[in-house]
Amino acid sequence: MSLMAPTLMETERFRAYGPRHIDEIARRYGLSDEIRDTVRLVSQVLPFRVNEYVLSSLVDWDNIPDDPIFQMVFPQRGMLRAADERRLAPLVGDRAARSDLRAEVRRIRAGLNPHPSGQKQLNVPTQGGEEIPGLQHKYRETVLYFPGQGQTCHSYCTYCFRWAQFVGDADLRFAAPAPDRLVDYLGEHPEVHDVLVTGGDPMVMSTERLRGHLEPLLGVETVRTIRIGTKSVAYWPQRFVGDQDADEVLRLFERIVASGRTLAVMAHFTHPRELETDLARRAVARIRATGAVVYCQAPLIGRVNDDARTWAELWRAELAAGAVPYYMFVERDTGPYDYFKVPLAKASEIFRAAYRELPGLARTVRGPVMSATPGKVVVDGVEETVHGRFFHLRMLQARNPSLVGRPFRARYSVTAAWLDELELAPDTPADIAAAVHGTPRPELTRTGSTGHQR
């Protein structure tokens, strides 16, 4: 890894800005009173957090409020239902109404589908009859691990499907205090060879804390791949370049690779501007120098990246940085979903148009993909038949392993934006139809020798 002397920007200390700093941000960047008040109102319900790098290096302050990065990190009017905003507004700032405000916030959050696709009901594994905190096991070979100290991010994305992790409600949050239960669970489930460390963002942790969560996995022989889901390369690349323990975290990555495991950094780049800075490109280069592989994924988001030119530019920038374009996701049905959603028909057109512009090495990307209750469903295209138009769909991943790779069809719709809005074709195989409609047979959902049914 390169240990060149860092610049002043690279060594800048991290500082987070939240709702209580909105007046300071508004004065600094000339935000209107309306925008300031909107952020203050909406952030009562949805999380708001930003940092100096995002403010000074990524947001285009000459294009407010339409700038895509501004839309990504600042709560906007329309993210909450108009009726909810009207009920919420008179309670904000009224000391006598604090209990009413808390109750109203809880009510609104409950209506925003805080845990989509059965995360709480279907994904949480059990051991000895008890649910294991901070773990999800949806697919046979992969376990998601949420280290408790990594359940924030350097900045919050307004579209994030994990927004419920950040609002301070313990009942909504996935968090594991230590990896002990994970290691025990992996010992009972040798079919799991892939652990995805996620959040929040694990890279908000110090290297010492991160090591405490990752190194125990090296003692589990059946774990062959460790993935780290992170937005830090886009939102705080200093984590790998100039932070006090940046070199130390890269040495930890080297140790994982030297153990014979594959270390994959799942970098979330949503817009090509996030890869335009020298800091971001240096961060990717330093990560790759450890032997880790950088995969890139992001959702298709209305008002942010819902055009083919933006995606083609993003994927080419990722390839140029030595990273692997991996997934274009469909925005999940949670949080401010109606504000950001893109119909599947438009999503499919955007993907195909952008894909056509790519060199062969960038055509590793898959999409548009719905990470839905039965699994990851990709829209492969649209078919014209004598019986009408159909979406061609395929199960890229599934709770039931026998469904993986299987194609099926659904009636074409110009408005449907999620799997449950589609009408399956009459020739859909019965087991796929059952999975899509939420009635999988129990014997098909077992993923482990001990009858794990999550």
Image (cartoon, grey):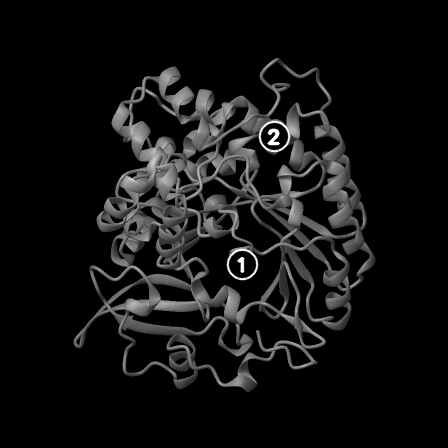
Q: Position of residue 10 (x, y in %)?
A: 61, 20
**Residue placed at 30% from the left, 34% from the top?**
38
Q: Is residue 415 left or right of residue 102?
A: left
Front one among 90 and 59: 90
Q: For mark 2, what is the residue? A: 283
C-alpha separation, residue under disc 2 versus residue under disc 1: 35 Å
- Determine which quarter of the picture holds residue 5: top right
Kind of element beneath mark 2? helix
Kind of element beneath mark 1? helix
Estimate how packed mark 1 is, as few (under 14), some (14 to 19) or many (20 or more) residues with alpha carbons within 10 Å: few
- Determine which quarter of the picture holds residue 289: top right
- Determine which quarter of the picture holds residue 354: top left
Q: Quadrant of the C terminus?
A: bottom right
Kind of residue sitting beneath label 2: Ala
Estimate how packed mark 2 is, as few (under 14), some (14 to 19) or many (20 or more) residues with alpha carbons within 10 Å: many
Q: Is residue 235 left or right of residue 255?
A: left
Q: Is residue 290 left or right of residue 351?
A: right
Q: For mark 1, what is the residue? A: 171
